Image (spheres, helix red, strand yellow):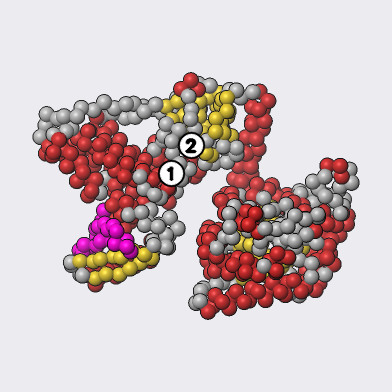
Amino acid sequence: MQVATGKSILNGIAIGPLRIYKKKETETAVTSSLTPEEEYARFDEARVKAQEQLGALYDKALDEVGEDNAAIFEIHQMMLDDDDYLDAVKGILDTQGATAEYAVSTTGENFSAAFAAMEDEYMRARAADVKDISRRVVNVLLGQDDEEMMADQPAILVADDLTPSETVQLDKSKLLGFITRHGSSNSHTAILARTMNIPALVGVDFQDDWDGKLAVIDGYNHCVYIEPAQELLSAMEEKRANDLKQEALLQSLKKKPNVTLDGKEIKVYANIGNAGDVGLVLQNDAQGIGLFRSEFIYLDSQDYPSEDQQFMLYKRVVETMAGKKVIIRTLDIGADKQADYFELDKEENPALGYRAIRICLTRKEVFKTQLRAILRASAFGTVSIMFPMIISVREVRDAKEILEECRAELQERGVAMGNVEIGIMVETPAAVMMADELAEEVEFFSLGTNDLTQYTLAIDRQNPKLDNFYDSHHPAVLRMIRHTIEAGHRHGCWVGICGELGADQTLTETFLRYGVDELSVSPASILPLRKIIRSLDLSKESQD
Amino acid sequence: MKQFTYTITDPVGIHARPAGMLAKAAKALDSTVTISKADGSKSAAATKLMAVMGLGVKTGETITFTIEGGDEEASAAAMEQFCKDNM
């Protein structure tokens, strides 16, 4: 077995034989026996024909991948109208007595090199677009088509590079996935692959002798296995079967409400750990983001991230969610999550130590930077703020006061802000016991069951010796949850669960009977949970 | 001659699609439209798709539009509206 790595552009598994595709080297004559005017007329005719082809591709892409993604072919058409491009071709024809083929491919190389030299990653990726249109014109001039890329059997396509037009032209019924040596995860080809839901790896240094061999693209781990061992192959087949199940579930449940047979509707939101997860959130049809773990911004950074940096990130998530609720949990660092520049002391008992809101309330400027960034992002959608690790009413009042200070500062700066709902994580036994008082201060509770379980049972879940004592369904924890939901409701708060227990399907009915309003789970758990909710009937006696 | 400045809000800057739309919109006008970077280092005719992309204008960057010839008033208004809608 051989393993090669690359950059995955879609989380998915593809299993099948590899097929290496080599573009035909086009031999073009350099010098022409025609006049420059005649060559230009040949070029112009080919150019118009290429634009017609692009028009047809646009229509095909419109059907398959939607207007936004089809737009690239419109751009390609326009590139072939570009004055500078036309002038460059004409210049070569006039001064070098060259063939139209030579003039076009040279112009393509020159323009593509100019883009490739640009600073911006996005613009560098445009080099492929210029090459693509030039190749298309040359093919028309030579009266040839590119070789049929796909064999008769379904296969994983392997190529040095794929242009957007090649990607759209591929026969989807035979394309299991693709691997390219070049290309960036930002290219139009990558975007199209994502939209078409095809597992793909770019930047793979493949070898010619791979042709025909069985391989697995593991998009989750950014690698491809050539002639995988039986054990690995079985594991991958299982993973793929799971993906397909998820996909089928998605098709059957997409856009359906999370409502029980007797008509109780509950919200199912997604937990995310970074801005890139938003794609998964939408793909799995979440109604909102119930837990946006903001600490990744700090953990990925070498120094305190600025207000602007954070604002851009929050804004991007909020805008992408387009009006759906985004609950941002303020910085929850400390304990097992450490960033060097915070210079936190080593602690004997970090889970009970200096972390989360305790850091925020004592390092006020760090906290305020984040709150201002969140408030600014709130102008672009529906944002809620949630404070972690709360044990007392005083902490909530202090945090709210700081939030108001930030709001006033921004108002002074004339910055637009939206309405922001305020809530707390309920993840300490203290917060559960104080739930009635705390509910007076906020608009929602979100139960963090991982910490709540650890603190309630006094069991460290990292310690395998304690497995025999650990019970994730311990009645003490369930009573805590029930108490919190009831206390919240008495004071007009909605109550959700964002910890691991929220995704525990054996407890979904129990939680619904407690009256929970929202469950926030990992994106992959949303649809299975929706399926369970839609099968429950709370008007009937519980079967337990 | 008329001039105005505009600050790009699109997170990717002037990428292929808005550049293509800009070229199309500028071609429809009877004036010549030139855009230039704030530091004056580079400029391009708005009708030239690849030259505009070649400016590499990023989000947050302010660019200057210069409109010459034809109905400058109307062309400037059309370009400003285009910016607000698309970039």
Tell me if I can see residue B26 in this picture.
no
Residue A231 position, x and y percent, is 68, 25
Give me the chain letter of mark 2: A
Tell me the SS state at disc 2.
Answer: strand
Q: Is residue A229 left or right of residue A462?
A: left
| CA distance separating discs 2 and 1 | 10 Å
Name the residue at 87% across, 54% down: A457
Name the residue at 55% across, 65% down: A307
Residue A173 position, x and y percent, is 49, 32
Pointer 1 residue? A187
Q: Is residue A63 left or right of residue A216?
A: left
Pointer 2 residue? A202
Name the residue at 54% across, 75% down: A410
- Quadrant containing the N terminus of chain A in the rendered view: top right
Name the residue at 23% across, 28% down: A28
Residue B20 position, x and y percent, is 32, 53
**Relative depth, front residue between A446 and A175:** A446
Tell me if I can see residue A20 in this picture.
yes
Tell me the SS state at disc 1.
Answer: loop
* Among numbered discs 2 and 1, the one appearing first in the sequence: 1
Q: Which residues are magenta?
A: B25-48
Type of amino acid at the residue the image marks with label 1: Ser
Q: Is residue A384 left or right of residue A46?
A: right
**Relative depth, front residue between A10 and B14:** B14
